[in-house]
Amino acid sequence: MKTSDAATPAIANVLVIDDNVILLRTVKDMLNSKYNVSIATSGEQALESIALKKPDVILLDYEMPDLDGEDVIKMLRDNEETADIPVLFLTSSASREVVTKLIMLNPDGYMLKPPNKQTMIDHIEKVLRNK
């Protein structure tokens, strides 16, 4: 997160990636008053967006067609320009198998869908403080 001057911190840029357009709109509406929120409906679209404007935090759907969350986080971590971007996974599955796979990817956190507004803000604020 960049600051314009010492007294006025800039608003964090959050990129939300999910193939569910309704969820994207909902999350954007929940976070828009606090952050600059961009959205992407696929892993490919997200990577193009990140190349143009590096976000401060990414909320990434774990299960998507084509490039899924696992593919996207691996690509981000393998690129020195994007390796340091905090990634919070969004998943609709609470199964032990999925959560174990997700944690093995070493994200900065994860949340179950549908996400709660305050939980999302708490997670985002935590990773921004640790950045």
Image (spheres, helix red, strand yellow):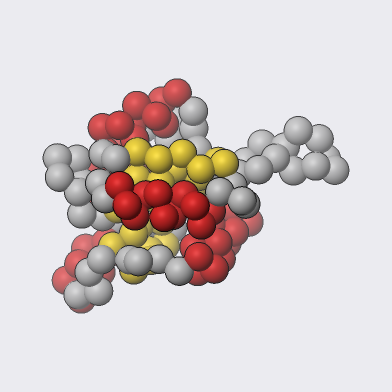
On screen, residue 88 above or below 4: below
The image quadrant where one finds the N terminus is top right
Residue 129 location in percent, x, y? Answer: 63, 56
- Image point 42% across, 62% down: which residue? 109
* Residue farthest to the right, as pictured: 7
Left or right: 28 as drawn, with respect to 74: right
* Residue farthest to the top, as pictured: 52
Left or right: 9 as drawn, with respect to 78: right
> Residue 124: in sight, yes or no?
yes
- Image point 30% across, 31% down: which residue? 45
Relative to the observer, which residue lies in front, 51 or 24? 24
Residue 39 location in percent, x, y? Answer: 40, 40
Residue 66 location in percent, x, y? Answer: 14, 40
Residue 103 location in percent, x, y? Answer: 30, 64
> Residue 104: in sight, yes or no?
no
Quarter holding residue 113 = bottom left
- Image point 56% across, 48% down: which residue? 32
Left or right: 123 as drawn, with respect to 107: right
On screen, residue 61 above or below 43: below
- Image point 85% across, 43% down: which residue? 7
How many numbered marks, from 0 up? 0
On screen, residue 121 above or below 60: below
